[in-house]
């Protein structure tokens, strides 16, 4: 299973991913970690696509080896997310109305999937947000 949190920088994607790891045995990959590991500091559309294509390849590899994966990336382009449409993947768009200091990295044309649940982290703890989605998508047996 793959769970992918996406949204603007500072929305709470990484925090939700780390919280979800308390419930699901999974490998977490994060956009900032991939950028640091491969030294990609290009936040243009081309740089973002390069980073996301690499992430998609890593997710696909981990999934093929039987790992559960939790991904947290800005991931603004539907076309790039669609590259994994053949996998068992759940996308969640994460948003907040709070100012969190990463607004300079926002993407103007972030594309929200029409069927992707929207998770609002404004004035909520990460556990509260995760508890909103757990009963909707996973049974207790699936978490064991």
Image: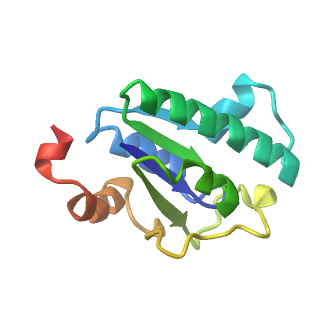
Q: Nearer the viewer, residue 13 or 126?
A: 13
Furthest-left residue in this view: 141
Establish if 92 lies above or below 66.
below
Which residue lies at the image location 41% right of the left edge and 24% below the top edge? 65
The residue at 25%/42% (across/down) is 23
Residue 83, above or below 31: below
Residue 143 lies left or right of residue 111; in this view the side is: left
Q: Position of residue 106 (x, y in %)?
A: 76, 61
Residue nearest the viewer, comparing 16 with 64: 64
Residue at point 67%, 69% (across, down): 111
Taking the image as shown, residue 57 lies to the left or right of residue 70, namely right
Residue 143 in the image, given as x and y percentages of width and height: 19, 42
Farthest-out residue, front = 86
Q: Nearer the viewer, residue 64 or 136?
A: 64
The N terminus lies in quadrant: top left
**Where, quadrant-wise, is the C terminus in this rendering?**
top left
Query: How far from the left and from the top, in percent, is residue 25?
Result: 29, 32
Q: Position of residue 115 (x, y in %)?
A: 47, 73
How many labels sit on residues?
0
Position of 122 compared to 24: left or right?
Answer: right
In the displayed structure, 20 sits above or below 33; it is below
- Left or right: where 66 falls relative to 138: right
Q: Which residue occupies the foreground of this view, 5 or 86?
A: 86
Query: What colour scheme does the image use?
Result: rainbow
């Amino acid at each position: 299973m793959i769970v992918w949190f996406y949204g603007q920088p500072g929305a709470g994607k990484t925090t939700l991913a780390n919280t979800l790891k308390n419930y699901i045995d999974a490998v977490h990959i994060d956009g900032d970690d991939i950028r640091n590991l491969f030294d990609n500091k290009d936040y243009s559309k081309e740089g973002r696509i390069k980073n996301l294509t690499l992430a998609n390849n890593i997710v696909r590899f981990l999934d093929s080896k039987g790992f559960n994966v939790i991904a947290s990336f800005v991931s603004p382009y539907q076309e790039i997310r669609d590259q994994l449409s053949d996998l068992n993947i759940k996308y969640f768009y994460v948003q907040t109305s709070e100012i969190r200091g990463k607004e300079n990295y926002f993407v103007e044309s972030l594309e929200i999937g029409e069927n992707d649940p929207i998770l609002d982290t404004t004035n909520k703890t990460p556990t509260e947000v995760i508890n909103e989605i757990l009963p909707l998508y996973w049974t207790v047996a699936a978490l064991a």
